[in-house]
Image (tube, rainbow, N blue to C red):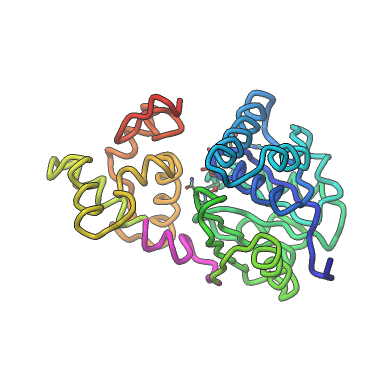
Amino acid sequence: MGPLTMHKVGVVGCGLMGSGIAEVCARAELDVVVIEVDTDALELGQSRVVGSLDRAVRAGKLEDAARDDVLSRIRFTTDFAELHDRTLVVEAVAEKEQLKVDVFSAIDAAVTSEDAVLASNTSSIPIMKLAAVTPQPQRVIGMHFFNPVPMLRLVELVPSLLTSPETVARAEAFCIGQLDKHIVHCKDRAGFVVNALLVPYLLAAIRMVESGFASAAEVDTGMIDGCNHPMGPLALCDLIGLDTIQFVAQSLYAEFKEPLYAPPSLLMRMVEAGLVGRKSGHGFFDYPAHK
Ligand SMILES: NC(=O)c1ccc[n+]([C@@H]2O[C@H](COP(=O)([O-])OP(=O)(O)OC[C@H]3O[C@@H](n4cnc5c(N)ncnc54)[C@H](O)[C@@H]3O)[C@@H](O)[C@H]2O)c1
């Protein structure tokens, strides 16, 4: 293990992203503690990790015994105090600023090592806002993974104005050397690189459906068959989660005041109705098996 290695990882929030981050860390032979808000969410998070590993076994990408080894490296708990000995904690709770601020304070209070790196998987909230609630902002960095984490190799690394070069170096070494990810460096601006480009495209697709210009299926077929995209924008909205897209759009709009980032009414109504995509079973399309 080199001097930059971070072997004890905490993941806070075990939804779509946290479960994937915990899985890739455990598959990289790291010791992982997963924190959830209550026991129901914890069980759901654990079943997400187990389900993903089972799919990898069925696809022939993981041995049965390796699956059990991976699971044995993850401890699931609701007790933030269990983060005390972590060298890296990745926060992956929902994209709500106040929630993240509160969770970041709790992580900072729980982690005892002054050298530990505190990372956020936020898609759009400025890292500086999270770093500002900790007494050591130099150890805070954005580490933005992509969904599904076990399949997509990119991580955007986002230092705030106060992140130390050492924290950046350790985060780079972690993502590249330990997780075998590709990284791009981004400035601390809402949306970073990928979402600043992707979200206006997704919102434009939603506006097309909202106006009756084309159906969700037609929009998606257009982009798959016309542009060779692997997935249409509305199926991608369902995969990401409409609630997450709404939060990200709101953050982008709050930062840049550009109409192209404003969440369309249809998106807000679908979120209010609980039609948030695959994770709820319904979004622009139906997913009976994902309920
Ligand atoms: N969904 C995506 O495609 C995607 C991609 C990249 C980044 N992100 C970002 O990742 C983060 C998480 O998104 P997600 O899609 O996994 O959301 P999600 O809603 O699937 O999961 C969030 C999890 O956080 C948990 N949580 C809430 N409050 C908590 C608390 N106080 N302590 C511990 N856990 C708590 C919830 O129970 C839930 O399981 C967001 O910042 C989002 O912007 C999402």
**Residue at position x 80%, y 59% from top?**
116
Question: Which residue is more in the foreground, 149 or 276?
Answer: 149
Image spot of residue 218 (x, y percent): 17, 44
Image spot of residue 194 (x, y percent): 43, 62
Image spot of residue 91 (x, y percent): 65, 49
Residue 101 showing in the rendered view = no
24 magenta-colored: no
Q: Is residue 96 left or right of residue 246?
A: right
Image spot of residue 24 (x, y percent): 64, 50
Q: Quadrant of ligand 1?
A: top right
The quarter of the picture where the N terminus appears is bottom right
188 magenta-colored: yes
The quarter of the picture where the C terminus appears is top left
Residue 281, image quadrant: top left
Q: Which residues are magenta?
A: 185-198
Residue 195 showing in the rendered view = yes
Residue furthest bottom in the image: 165
**Residue at position x 55%, y 72% from top?**
185
